[in-house]
Amino acid sequence: MTHAREILDTHPGTVGLDAAALVECIEACFDCAQSCSACADACLGEEEVSQLRRCITMCLNCSDVCATTGRIVSRQTDFEPAMARTALQACAEACRLCGEECEHHGREMNMEHCRVCAEACRRCEEACSQALSSIGG
Amino acid sequence: MTHAREILDTHPGTVGLDAAALVECIEACFDCAQSCSACADACLGEEEVSQLRRCITMCLNCSDVCATTGRIVSRQTDFEPAMARTALQACAEACRLCGEECEHHGREMNMEHCRVCAEACRRCEEACSQALSSIGG
Amino acid sequence: MTHAREILDTHPGTVGLDAAALVECIEACFDCAQSCSACADACLGEEEVSQLRRCITMCLNCSDVCATTGRIVSRQTDFEPAMARTALQACAEACRLCGEECEHHGREMNMEHCRVCAEACRRCEEACSQALSSIGG
Amino acid sequence: MTHAREILDTHPGTVGLDAAALVECIEACFDCAQSCSACADACLGEEEVSQLRRCITMCLNCSDVCATTGRIVSRQTDFEPAMARTALQACAEACRLCGEECEHHGREMNMEHCRVCAEACRRCEEACSQALSSIGG
């Protein structure tokens, strides 16, 4: 349960993109920011940590980009489409790269946290793409 | 829907505090980080923005503290209770201060986004207090 | 004085882009993240806050993007050019948009903090462009 | 070179604590946020990464706390001493814990990036303590 929808519905201004796509994008970004931080940490705790370096770096980067993008699209006062567009593009790309890396370890190394994290990444990549479409990006 | 519980359950190590309290704390921190960013933005869009300065500053500060605390407690590899304790204390205090400010504007100025944000703050303050108890803080 | 150069020089691996361009980019990103947070706050304290809404939103967004990009380019273990490229593009664009907005208020409204913040934005936009060139972006 | 002092000097309001202590604290927080991100990354690239798990977790936590604290003290509009106090206490503690861990690896394992990072941590711990004194914390 999050409060994203309720706060958006009480915003004094008009919203710069489709509200349903926006709420899903906000929630997916914050969820993915958390999942990627947690997956980087779980990878660090694995015995085979030295084989998970790329995955850890990807997760740390993706977590930062998702947190930033979730905040940017949450800001609807004087919403600037050019700003949202470049952030959403970076976020979709970060999620694609991190999702592929995590999926690979989930399958090849049986890393369950990577498999779950890949799910969060794919959901977020999709939500960013939808939000991009709704602002003409 | 978040992936916090699933990733925690697949962590290779042992978890440094009660798992249910931890998941609630993680989810409350990320939700409150989002709510406070969105409430600061909604306040900025209000006609009476000049009366909402303290609320905006509180929300920006609380959003940052919640995002940081949500990440810190998500990290369970070589979990250090002293680190978690000081972060959770700061987060509970930030949520208390921001929640009081938002509740005030929700009631006195009929700001619905402030009323919703106060809910997110109180949930997070409570979750941080519970997590603190579970690590003996 | 920062420790960016010293830590980079002691990194166990090879660095994925020109080291001088990288250090300047890291320092410019962290400086701009701070300047934009401080300028948003100073704008909020101005009597004419209602005319500075767009500037505040731009500064908050730019601060988040710069902090994230500064961290991403600081990570050189398993450096992924595609990740750095999309982050640097978003950062250059955020700095361009925010720098233009701040410069405008610095000139038209005599807002000194906006004038200084525009300087930090332009420096960071330039540093991101240089870093992009050095990774072929 | 940072723009922290210049923006602070042009703030429309009064500053809630000693200006010199504040600028040093802001700069030390952002420098330490960067150093800790870079040191976590350098540790991850070391052959002995499995012996550096605690150091990586400490650095990631410290980086987040420093970035958040640097922003909170940068916000001087409706400055709330209780908020600054709890953030500065968390930051001083994070820097103390991370600085000790890094210093240990710098000495025992000849990790130069840890030695440099310990310097950034100690500077930031000291700056937070000074800022705390100046607000009566």
Image (tube, coloured by chain):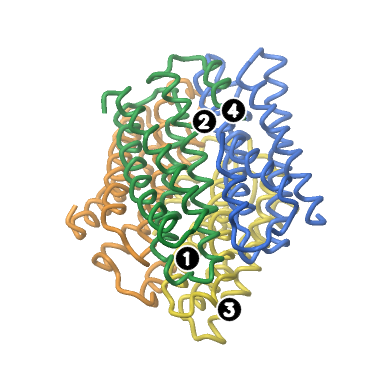
Chain colours: A orange, B yellow, C green, D blue
Instruction: Write down the residue under mark 2.
Output: A44
Q: Nearer the viewer, residue D43 or C33?
A: C33
Foreground disc of the pair 1, 2: 1
Labels 3 and 4 touching (C-beta < 8 A)? no
Whole-Å distance between the Cαs marked 1 and 4? 33 Å
Q: In this rendering, do the residues under marks 1 and 4 share a single chain?
A: no
- Amino acid at circle 4: Arg
Residue drawn at (55%, 20%), measured in percent from left and top?
Answer: D49
Instruction: Write down the residue under mark 4.
Output: D53
Badge 2: residue crowd in 10 Å (few <14, some 14–19, many ≥20): many
Whole-Å distance between the Cαs marked 1 and 2? 30 Å
Residue drawn at (32%, 57%), measured in percent from left and top?
Answer: A25
Q: Secondary structure at mark 3?
A: helix
Q: Secondary structure at mark 1?
A: helix
Which circle's residue, 1 or 3, is located before the other in the chain?
A: 1
Relative to A89, residue A11 above or below = below
- Relative to D40, is C95 on the left or the right? left
Q: In the rendered structure, the residue with mark 4 lies on which chain? A: D
Badge 3: residue crowd in 10 Å (few <14, some 14–19, many ≥20): many
Specify the quadrant that holds the N terminus of chain C. top right
Instruction: Write down the residue under mark 3.
Output: B103
Picture quadrant of residue B119:
bottom right
- Amino acid at circle 3: Glu
Q: Nearer the viewer, residue A77 or C130?
A: C130
Q: Secondary structure at mark 4?
A: helix
The circle on residue B35 is 1
Labels 3 and 2 touching (C-beta < 8 A)? no
Q: In this rendering, do the residues under marks 3 and 4 share a single chain?
A: no
Counting from the top left corner in percent of width and height, residue C15 is at 42, 18
Counting from the top left corner in percent of width and height, residue C54 is at 38, 63
